[in-house]
Image: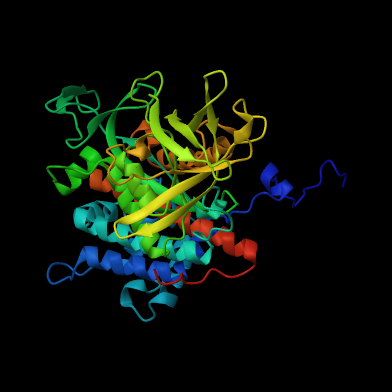
């Protein structure tokens, strides 16, 4: 037989596989690994709590573990797609065999156990409440902390001013478009039924104006993550509702703002990892006293200064500070987020801090930055190679909020940009969440608590996948996380 007509057993591979860059596990490997992990048992316990005790009515057809499997696989899929997956070849038999290993002797997991129908997802929606979603968020956070400790996240191998990649938190706000943007009492003709019907609307969705001035009708969530040097090894600690979305879920009359939600989450993380993280990457939604709070949490805020005028930030005189060697004083001005001195031509010269340190006081931290004037700077030559110290946090007896106007590194400078590029991982996570949830440009769930749960499930699976990649790179089997 000629080579042209012969059949080859070689599989067609993509570029990542041929170049050895395909480090992530395939979906089936990830699924089986999860079924054999202690995380799955905790998920089953959470599902059992959502279902409650069965005291009356027809006997249950499906085990809590079957609900957990269906819920896990629902990530970014339709109900029909999950059921179709169960019906593929011997998939259901393999799943039952794995579940019997975790729950031996259970009569609901025998060989003749029925394949669930799509009604299982309707029952889930009826059983899982907003309080159950909050409980799952707590479980997700604890597991994320466990993953982070095992992966070495929160360990700073460098300085506080320019910390290592694993010691930096990055986050952003993500908006998820509502399942329906129709206003209440909107009627439309349905050609399939030949009747007029009331259009579904999301009662709790709100109008959001995106950064590029696009209008979007949906729900807002904030998240914080950390990663190793490998982009696939990123752990998202949580994703939380903010503003009107939080009000719709909790019913609070005064819902927390984005900055407060993010900093509350950062505080939870710092307490869980003993204050190991050293930097916070975020946008200008965190400003003023909230930046001061980031300093008090031990986080160097790599956050752009909020531009009040829309053109330029105002020039704020910070006072005079003594030079270390010259013993003379030099005037320092905060401008566009940088500490500046006045040059020989009267122009402001931006400086980058050489280092930062803190002093623990009874009322918190007092953070100071050490600035050195480089040789060749267009200023008095007597100031060259000399240094002075400027407080980054609020000073007693002064009404000036320094965190509103000042950063150790000049925003937009070379050192600033080398660190600010790390925040791209937060934008990538936004794309991952919206790509996984907004099928057909809209969320698959109507109520905000359901949208929140969908987002949590998405990042929970992503965290487990990142943990598997880390274990594969280290050559060890995935095991239980450290206690949070």
- Give left or right: position of 219 versus 189: right
Residue pictured at 47% horizontal, 63% vertical: 147
Color style of the picture: rainbow
> Could you tell me how many numbered marks the image carries?
0
Residue 119 visible here: yes
Q: Work out which residue is located at the far bottom of the displayed protein and give it.
A: 105
Q: Work out which residue is located at the far right of the displayed protein and give it.
A: 2
Residue 455 visible here: no
- Observer-nearest of 390 and 483: 390
Residue 475: where, in percent of width, then height? 64, 67
Does 262 appear above or below 349?
below
- Give left or right: position of 246 versus 319: left
Residue 406: where, in percent of width, then height? 42, 36
- Give left or right: position of 60 versus 196: right
Does 299 appear above or below 371?
below
The quarter of the rendered structure image containing the C terminus is bottom left
Residue pictured at 23% horizontal, 59% vertical: 132
- Observer-nearest of 476 and 447: 476
- Observer-nearest of 71 and 312: 312
Residue 49: where, in percent of width, then height? 23, 67
- Observer-nearest of 262 and 302: 302
Residue 327: where, in percent of width, then height? 53, 42
């Amino acid at each position: 037989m000629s080579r042209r007509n012969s059949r080859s057993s070689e599989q067609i591979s993509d570029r990542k596989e041929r170049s050895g860059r395909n480090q992530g596990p395939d979906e089936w490997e990830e699924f089986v690994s999860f079924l054999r992990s202690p995380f799955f048992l905790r998920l089953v316990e959470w599902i059992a709590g959502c279902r409650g005790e069965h005291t009356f009515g027809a006997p249950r057809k499906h085990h809590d573990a079957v609900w957990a499997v269906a819920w896990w696989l629902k990530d970014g899929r339709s109900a029909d797609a999950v059921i179709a997956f169960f019906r593929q070849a011997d998939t259901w038999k393999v799943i039952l065999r794995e579940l019997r290993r975790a729950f031996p002797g259970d009569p609901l997991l025998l060989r003749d156990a029925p394949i669930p129908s799509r009604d299982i997802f309707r029952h889930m929606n009826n059983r899982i409440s907003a309080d159950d979603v909050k409980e799952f968020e707590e479980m997700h956070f604890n597991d994320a902390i466990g993953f982070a400790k095992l992966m070495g996240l929160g360990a700073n191998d460098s300085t506080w001013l320019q910390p290592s990649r694993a010691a930096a938190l990055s986050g952003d706000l993500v908006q998820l478009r509502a399942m329906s943007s129709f206003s209440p009492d909107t009627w439309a003709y349905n050609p399939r039924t030949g009747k007029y019907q009331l259009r579904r609307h999301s009662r709790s969705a709100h109008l959001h104006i995106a950064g590029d001035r696009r209008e979007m009708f949906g729900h807002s969530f904030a998240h914080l993550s950390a990663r190793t040097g490998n982009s696939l090894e990123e752990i998202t600690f949580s994703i939380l509702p903010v503003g009107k979305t939080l009000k719709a879920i909790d019913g609070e009359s005064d819902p927390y703002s984005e900055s407060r939600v993010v900093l509350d989450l950062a505080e939870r993380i710092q307490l869980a990892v003993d204050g190991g993280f050293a930097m916070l990457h975020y946008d200008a939604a965190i400003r003023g006293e909230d930046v001061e709070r980031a300093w008090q949490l031990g986080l160097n805020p790599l956050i752009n200064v909020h531009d009040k005028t829309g053109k330029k930030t105002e020039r704020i005189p910070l006072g005079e500070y003594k030079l270390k060697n010259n013993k003379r004083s030099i005037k320092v001005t905060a401008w566009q987020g940088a500490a500046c001195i006045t040059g020989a031509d009267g122009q402001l010269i931006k400086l980058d801090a050489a280092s930062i340190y803190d002093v623990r006081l009874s009322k918190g931290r007092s953070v100071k930055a050490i600035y050195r004037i480089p040789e060749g700077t267009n200023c008095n030559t007597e100031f060259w190679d000399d240094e002075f110290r400027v407080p980054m946090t609020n000073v007693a007896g002064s009404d000036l909020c320094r965190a509103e106007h000042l950063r150790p590194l000049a925003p937009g400078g070379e050192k600033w940009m080398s660190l600010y590029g790390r925040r791209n991982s937060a934008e990538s996570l936004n794309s991952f969440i919206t790509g996984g949830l907004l099928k057909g440009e809209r969320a698959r769930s109507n109520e905000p608590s359901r949208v929140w749960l969908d987002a949590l499930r998405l990042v929970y699976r992503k965290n487990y996948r990142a943990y598997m990649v880390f274990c594969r790179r280290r050559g060890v089997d995935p095991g239980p996380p450290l206690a949070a």
